[in-house]
Amino acid sequence: MPIKVSVVIPVYNPGSYIEDCIASLLRQSLPGDEYEAIFVDDGSTDETPERLDRLAAEHPHMHVIHQEGSGWSGKPRNVGMAAAKGEFIQFVDNDDWLGDEALERMYDYGVEHNADVIVGKMVGKGRPVPRELFRKNRPHASVENAPLIDSLTPHKMFRKAFLDKYDLRYMEGRRRLEDHVFVTEAYLRAENVSVLSDYLCYYHVKREDASNAGFQRFEPVGYFKNLREALDVVEELTEPGPLRDRLFRRWLRNEMVERMRGQRLLKLPADYRRELFDEIHKVVVERFGPGVAAGLQTTQRIVADLIAAGRLADLEEFARWESGIKASGVLENLGWQSGRLTIGFTAEYKSGGEPVTFRADGEKDLLVPPLPRTSLDAIARLGADTSAPLAKSKVDVVVRERVTAAEFFQPVEFTREKLAVKGRPGYFRHVLRATARIDPLSAANGVGLDAGIWDVFVRITACGWTKDTRLGSVRGEEAGRERRAAVVGSPAHLVLPYWTDPHGNLSLDVDGHTDRIPYEFAALTPADVTVATDPDRLTVALPLHVQGESEATLKLTNVATGRSTRVSAALTARVTGEAELSAALPLGEPAGGQWQLELILPPSGAGEPVALPLALDVPASGGAVVRHLAAVAADLAAKDPGRRRPASRRAGLTFLRRAAGRLRRALKK
């Protein structure tokens, strides 16, 4: 069987971190005879070489190459490429790991679209990864029509024949940004690049000891010498003009401007800060024409102009102000509509707890940072454009899985509003008023959300800032009234929007990963319970959203004996927005006594039974009466306050009292 994919992993002293990488490779959905993994041990001095030798002995498609240490990742990647037999080559770092179906999905996607490069969706575990690039699938991407240049790490799949055609190899030796040079040339030479965004392919991990090479403080002169080599590739393969300027802008923004902003700048020691600033200043002056900085957002442009002018002190003042800018959001309403969770909210930037304000100047809206006059004068003399392009501001809603950190954009509709600032004529707040809709069955780029806890974030982009905030801790009075669990899809899934402890932010529990569902039904009152004309049927209104009808199971447990039985139940949507639970009562089975009611919800009846605050009284004479647990426990205590009871009756009363106690605690919570 021809090998479809060769996975190349450079290895140097990963310790236990390599275990996740190995496990993910062994879990791949591709058959073992259709892919291979090539670990290139670059002179490791820990126990890794022996670990890899054992792995290769146990698994024929796992290979190990040992070599003397080269000092960086370039040479081991090249050695792995030379040994690779696959149609495609996937690069993985030894402390990262792959999604279980990553190789199969990326290979099939690349073959389908005849791609030379396949970029799989990445998630950052403690480190940043591109976001906008993975907003959607992009089967035919290029540097002209997609933000590919935002993703320059090597963790991609490349057609081996394409790499050989252009002799694409990594620069070797102890150096920085060799992946920028390699990936940039690949993008610019590829016939097609395909971006797969509907499956989480690559987990990019920051080690707990922060010993990843990319997190080590670098020597500025060498770093920016290597950066110039990436710029050389762009100059060689593009013509002067807007495209080259846009590509250069990536390095100006990410590697220079962002290092000179906010706390990232202010946390640096003063001497290192000056050394870094001087090297960045040289590159900006030597390599970038006016069209590069011109495409930056307002705050980025101010920083770039201050760098070009050599004004570090003014840059530090601007950084002190910027470091206080935060996104904020107010949840206005929340509810389910046709299986989708609808979220209404407002969002804006704040500084020091107060809204960021802007000033109207004719047709322009101006950003007015509260800086010393000397700094403002310096910015003005530079000719920096402080106009705020508020018409381009936007707000997104992102759901992020708590364990994997996978995140997905949700559909949002929004308007931009200018709210006057009292006592300051001409000044206004910029508020985004939005409605987002989360469909649990398609929220992960067209597929359903996996089981787990998904945190809800608001992301504001304006004036050169992109900042996230949690949603829910600040909310209006209406926001919680329609909050309830929902049963959606077929097979059914249980989705619970809830407020986190202790901050009260909005999260989604998909398929019962918390113990919160019982509290959703604790507020049932006797008025919620109705018994139909047929005394053998139970009907209860539940605070639950369903579409049409869904199946459930009702568990009945005898209070005295502990014996239980289960009956099929139906959940049906009501016009009031609640769900109606309906079940035929097998009165021949629970004859006599009192029975506690528990509901077993989807998925597939696998969840734990959820206690309802209801008890079923089945008189020996026939029929049935449904009563509230608190009333049952109170009646029992009143009728028999001090007498010693038989063991079975004592157990039954204890059962009911404890259930009533749980009810009271749930209501308080």
Image (spheres, rainbow, N blue to C red):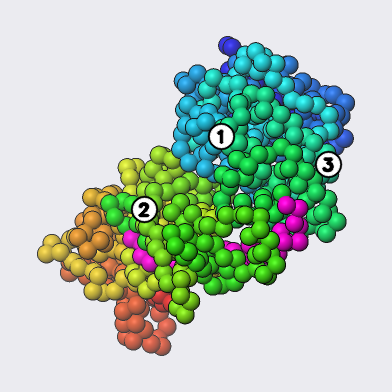
Tell which of 164 and 639 is nearer to you. Answer: 164
User: CA separation, marks 2 and 1?
Assistant: 31 Å
Q: Are marks 2 and 1 in contact (CB under 8 Å)?
A: no
Which residue is label 3 attached to?
221
Three-letter residue code for mark 1:
Pro
The amino acid type, in three-letter code, at marker 2 is Glu
Q: CA distance from mark 2 to mark 3?
A: 46 Å
Residue 370: quadrant of the picture: bottom right
Q: Mark on residue 514?
A: none
Tell me the amino acid under the disc marked 3.
Answer: Val
Quadrant (top left/top right/bottom left/bottom right) for the C terminus: bottom left
Q: Which residue is mark 2?
A: 413
* Horizontal arrangement in the rendering, residue 629 relative to residue 319 (left or right): left
| Residues at marks 2 and 3 touching, judged by CB atoms closer than 8 Å | no
Q: Position of residue 45 (x, y in %)?
A: 87, 35
To which residue does mark 1 refer?
A: 242
Q: Magenta stretch?
A: 309-335
Can you give x and y, in whole percent of width and height, for residue 187 in the image?
60, 26
Question: Residue 528 colored magenta?
Answer: no
Label 3 element class? helix
Q: Position of residue 544 (x, y in %)?
A: 31, 60
In the rendered image, the residue lying farthest to the front is: 381
Along the polypeptide, which appears first: circle 2 or circle 1?
A: 1
Front in this rendered view, residue 428 or 152 = 428
Along the line of sight, which residue is nearer the eye, 98 or 127?
127
Q: Are marks 3 and 1 in contact (CB under 8 Å)?
A: no
Res 156 → quadrant: top right
Which circle's residue, 2 or 3, is located before the other in the chain?
3
Residue 547 can be seen, yes or no: yes
